[in-house]
Amino acid sequence: GAEDMFGKKVVLIGCGSLGSDIAYLLAKSGVGTLTLIDADILDWDNVGRHLLGAEAVGLSKVKALKRLIERQLPHISVEAIEKEWENVWADSPIVFQDADLIVSTTAIFKSESSLNCLNRIATGFPPIIYGWTEPYWCAGHALLVMGAGGCLSCGMSDVGDFVLQVCKWEGTTLLKEPACGDSYQPYSILDVEPIKTMISELAFDVLYEHRSL
């Protein structure tokens, strides 16, 4: 199936510590065309758990990730779009409509709810995989939405909490930065590796014409 995989086009929304590695795994596995969508830059506090290293701090995540993939795999076509996906849809809907698969790992309720609604009303939309983690990265989820039937909102509460959680915690699971006061979710880079693999394997199944679905 390597030749078929090289002809596939995948759009990845969100290139953080989860999405960047999924993009890299897809490229290593032979996906021929990747479109990376993320408006953020890499900060120092992301370096310890992000595919990109210190040399990319202060740079666009998608542009630095594009450079990394193209240096190692020059036969892979990578497009980097430093925007929110909503703006990409407004400017060039063909970016999504021409893809074989969309993978979203933003875990931002407003953003992914909008993507879910668009998928339900727009014609010619490809399958979508939503990937996210639970607090402390003790568990992860990969939800495939394709064609008629269920959607992201079916398993979510009105405020964006996933109903079928694996782990439940009392109180907040977020910690505060000592200086700026930003909130963050603590986890080890080792904790997330199985989750990246799970989401990537589901993507492979979809691209290989749903052979195991």
Image (cartoon, rainbow, N blue to C red):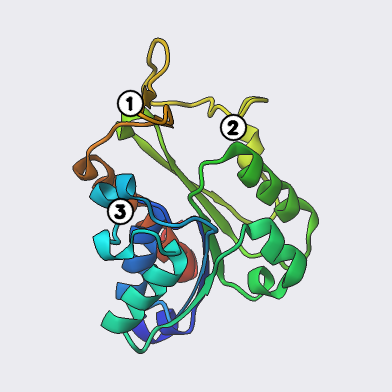
Kind of residue indicated by mark 1:
Pro
Residue at far left of view:
190
Neighbor class of circle 2 (other Cα within 10 Å; few <14, some 14-19, many 20+) is: some
The residue at the point 65 percent across, 36 percent down is: 153
- Which of the two marks, 3 or 2, is nearer to us in this view? 3
In space, the residues marked 3 and 1 are separated at their CA atoms by 21 Å
Kind of residue indicated by mark 2:
Gly
In this orientation, which residue lies closer to the viewer: 213 or 132?
A: 132
Q: Which residue is mark 1?
A: 178
Kind of residue indicated by mark 3:
His
Q: Is residue 28 above or below residue 111?
A: below
Instruction: Name the disc covering residue 139, or none.
Output: none
Instruction: Name the disc covering residue 50, or none.
Output: 3
Q: Which residue is mark 2?
A: 155
Q: Earlier in the sequence, mark 3 or mark 2?
A: 3
The residue at the point 42 percent across, 83 percent down is: 6
In this orientation, which residue lies closer to the viewer: 15 or 146?
A: 15
Q: Which image quarter is the N terminus in?
A: bottom left
Q: Is residue 39 above or below residue 154?
A: below
Question: Residue 58 location, x and y as percent?
Answer: 39, 59
